[in-house]
Amino acid sequence: MTGASFDRVEELFADLFPLTRSLTGNGVRQTLDRLSDVTPLNVRTVPSGTPVYDWEVPPEWNIRDAYVTDSSGKRVVDFADSNLHVVNYSVPVDVELSFDELSEHLHTLPGMPDAIPYRTTYYERDWGFCIRHDTLEAMDEDETYEVYIDSDLDPEGELTYADAKIEGESEREYIISTYCCHPSLANDNLSGLILATLLFELLRQGSTHHSYRLIVVPETIGAISYLHEHENAMKTVDGGYVVTTVAGRGRSIIRSRSREIIRSTWLLAGRSRATSTTNTSSLRPAATSDSTARRAFAFRPGPSRRTNIMNTTPTTHRKTTSRSSLARHS
């Protein structure tokens, strides 16, 4: 492993972290375009409204700007500061509201007052803002606020995903899957996107015994769409590896975890650190049985110490909730 490899991980994090990913939209396309610089991907689309089993591909969502301003014009909440501030898939909004009316659409984490929660409204037409609880506490209950969300839901849009395949010598095929739909969340799941892409590129550098398929899809509806589009191919798959939340916790996540991500790539590919900077022409996990295949892809990360803000239940502040009761809940 070289310093250049670690630099590549950090470069990918820096490029991909700010993109506003969702189930659909420009952020997904931009992410797949960037990952295609690492390893060749087949980028595919499914039109909005397409039935996929008993689901339906949703309208394509894109957002350009969003904010909440007070009566002086100061932006109390600004999408430009963090794309987590807007509930993912929020409908367009341009309205003035009292604090009580606005508070029905504000989501915070009282137990983590400096954190921005992550919320979505994929399949229900709604809108909202995710803000720091400290920001909520500083807002004036007697103010009138201007609320603006510049977004659109295009029924003639599309869902975008990507895949790639390495043909091996055996008749067995294994999937490396990860999801591409979360905005600025480094661990869940930008870390998985980067690791899966690097792993697949590593496998692609030499001949392999088995075939491997990389699948990058938005969660749930993307996986369902992929199965619907590739049903026959999926019937012959022997197994798979879902790569997700492989980084750690803390503000220095990118720098401190880049080494572990690279090392994990080599381990998952069945290679040792000793060979990682030498011969790449004969990459061949010698998998002649299921148990051998499992050993070749054995990766056991250390104990998880992360706090997944996305899975922490935010508090939605209704207009009947007074500031004093909010304080008690926190």
Image (tube, grey):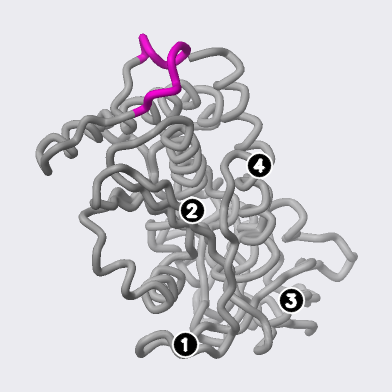
Residue 96's spot in the image, x, y percent?
79, 83
Of residues 160 and 239, the one nearer the viewer is 239
For label 2, the residue is 164
According to the image, label 3 marks what residue?
A: 151
Please report the residue visible at 30 percent of the width from the left and 42 percent of the height from the top: 169
- Mark 1 or 2 closer to N-term? 1
Q: Name the quadrant containing residue 17.
A: top right
In this view, the mark in front (4 or 2):
2
Q: Nearer the viewer, mark 2 or mark 3?
A: 2
**Is 260 on the left-hand or right-hand side of 240?**
right
Amino acid at pointer 2? Ala
Q: CA distance from mark 1 to mark 3?
A: 21 Å
**Disc 3 residue type (three-letter):** Ser
Q: Secondary structure at mark 4?
A: loop
Name the residue beneath numbered marker 4: 37
Rendered image quadrant of residue 26:
bottom right
The answer, for residue 172, to whether it is visible in the render is yes
Instruction: Give the Cα distance between marks 1 and 4.
Output: 31 Å
* Inter-mark Cα distance, 4 to 2: 13 Å
Figure quadrant of the C terminus: bottom left
Asked whether the beta carbons under mark 1 and mark 4 sit within 8 Å of each other, the answer is: no
Q: Disc 1 or 4, which lies upstream in sequence?
A: 4
| Magenta range | 273-283
Callout 4 touching callout 2 (CB < 8 Å):
no
Q: Nearest to the eye among marks 1 and 3: give it.
A: 1
Q: Tag 2 or tag 4, which sits nearer the N-term?
A: 4
Q: Earlier in the sequence, mark 4 or mark 3?
A: 4
Residue at disc 3, secondary structure: strand
**Residue 56: mark:** 1
Left or right of residue 221: residue 133: right
